[in-house]
Image: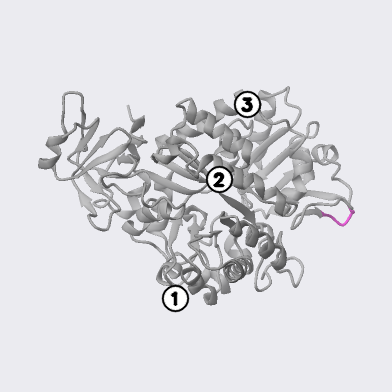
Amino acid sequence: MPHADLLIVNANVFTANPARPNAQAVAVAGNRIAFVGNAEDAGHWRGPATRVMDGGGCTLMPGFIDSHFHLLHGSTELADTLRELADVSDLDGLAQTIQGCAANHPNDPILLGAGLRYKIGGIAPLRVTRHVLDTILPDRPLIVLAYDHHTAWANTQALKLGNLLKDGNVVGPNSEIVVGDDGLATGELREPGAYRPITDIIPPPDDARKRALLHQGLALAASFGVTSVHNMDGDAEQIALYAALEDAGELTLRVYCPYSITPETEPEDLAEAVMMKQEHQSGSSARFASGQAMVRGGCVKFFMDGVIESYTALMLDEYTDAQAPGNFGGALYSAGHFTRMATECDRLGLQIFVHAIGDGAVRRTLDGFESVAQTNGKRDSRHRVEHIELIHPDDLPRFARLGVIASMQPLHCPSSVDGNDVWPSRAGHARWHRSFAWQSLREAGATLAFGSDWPVVSQNPMLGVHAALNRQPWAEGLPHHRQTLADILVAYTRDAAYAEFQEHQKGQLRPGFLADLVLLSEDIFAMPPEDAARVHPLLTVCDGRIVYEKG
């Protein structure tokens, strides 16, 4: 019997393997799991060079697979000069943060920050205007993005720089420059199609800086036990950057990278997505053929709509608190446009991810997937809907019937309706029962994959576990959507691997699978649910290599 390189004993092993859900020890040889079983049998794997670790009765489980992640975008945002905006609770705090940053970075021609909540100190988002920002920073362009990157607020200097101050500007689809009674922009810019004329002026980091920032993002992920991510934006250049890190031995998690599709994308442009699949998935290299490649292509990403917070999510019924009557939100694609592009993607064998938040966007996406199957024939496509913050009951069973994955993010769900989150009021009380409907989808037979959407929220999966485990209804009589701990962990492991066609390679602790695992600081099955957020990794292993160890 060969000896293990790493042997972890005396652990409470959650395997995510339904045939053997629990064990006490795991052995790793090379980049594969060699043994999962009891303490007595584990001793046979111990050799003179084996590193033996005592799990201390803590939970040992498959590495977390984050099913909705922005690796490069989140990493580059670590360089933003304004990084404390998520902690701002009032306008005084906003002023102090911005002015302090301006003083510390006197040579930055534009100040850019992200993370601001839509509601601070009880003030609605429209109160954050260019005039307010002008009082904070009048003499330098300033643009502040909401935490979800779907809205930005700019001062007058920034609006002038982007030629956005006066009315009449042409913006991208489902985007809006909010205009005041004076015919000038208020400073609120809804969706990237409205604010990119400003942000695109800011030069991106060069390749060396990107690589350095990626190392920071990767180190953060390893410290949280994340061993795989489904990236939600990409192109040939971005996937090549990840592959270069892999070739240099610097990549510490696995990346599934899509080709980003926009309303301007033409069918012939999909050749780039096919190339990404061929070069990074289809076995063209010996490393992938042996199941060792860390970077994979083979998928595409659409944005169907925006977000409820900025009234840009597509709804089946009008917003209840919209400023204009008859506001149903909007979409980036008509039903016909999406179906045509999705049909071509599916014909090329590409998996499809679709950002769809409003119930209207979810239905339009499912309608498109159904039409695709009718045109191209049904196959194991595992197309996905990302977010699904609202869903109509009639659409719940369609996920299982169409074989569509529900990719959702527990931390996106507001914990209550009386905090600083505008989501519940924008959606309206009548829709609360079908908001973030995790359990309804699960009971309807859908496969759920969980993730974070970093950098929109923290990439720490234990915060997501805590949110899903402790969720309470927003009002009496509403259904419970809290999840069991086992279901949550499966959504972050086995079912997340299924959502990227890797269920026979990872997402479980079983012999022959890739050695991606995390040892947590406690036995999470023995602790009170409300304490889940305090749990942290002691050890993270990816591809058989220790990529994080708590000192």
Residue 400 horizontal/vertical position (percent): 46, 69
Residue 474 horizontal/vertical position (percent): 48, 66
The amino acid type of the residue labelled 2 equals Lys
Q: CA distance from mark 1 to mark 2?
A: 47 Å
Which residues make up the magenta segment?
Answer: 179-183
Drawn side of residue 415 relative to residue 61, left or right: right
Mark 2–mark 3 CB contact (< 8 Å): no
Which of pointers 1 and 2 lies earlier in the amino acid sequence?
2
Q: Which residue is mark 3?
A: 207
Q: Residue furthest bottom?
A: 394
Foreground tag (1 vs 2): 2
The amino acid type of the residue labelled 1 equals Gly
Q: Residues within 10 Å of mark 1 (few under 14, many from 20)?
A: few
Residue name at image x 52 percent, y 68 percent: 378
Q: CA distance from mark 1 to mark 3?
A: 54 Å
State whether the magenta stretch is mostly helix, strand or loop. loop
Q: Which mark is residue 477?
A: 1
The C terminus: image quadrant: top left
Q: Which residue is mark 2?
A: 277
Residue name at image x 54 percent, y 29 percent: 244
Residue name at image x 42 percent, y 53 percent: 496
Q: CA distance from mark 2 to mark 3?
A: 23 Å
- Residue 180 is covered by the magenta coloring: yes
Residue 402 horizontal/vertical position (percent): 51, 69
Q: Is 129 drawn above or below residue 315 in the view shown?
A: above
Q: Is 119 drawn above or below residue 479 in the view shown?
A: above
Where residue 226 sits, quadrant-wise, is: top left
Q: Is 417 drawn above or below residue 55 in the view shown?
A: below
- Residue 154 is covered by the magenta coloring: no
Residue name at image x 66 percent, y 24 percent: 104
Report the front residue among 297 and 324: 297
Residue 43 horizontal/vertical position (percent): 12, 36
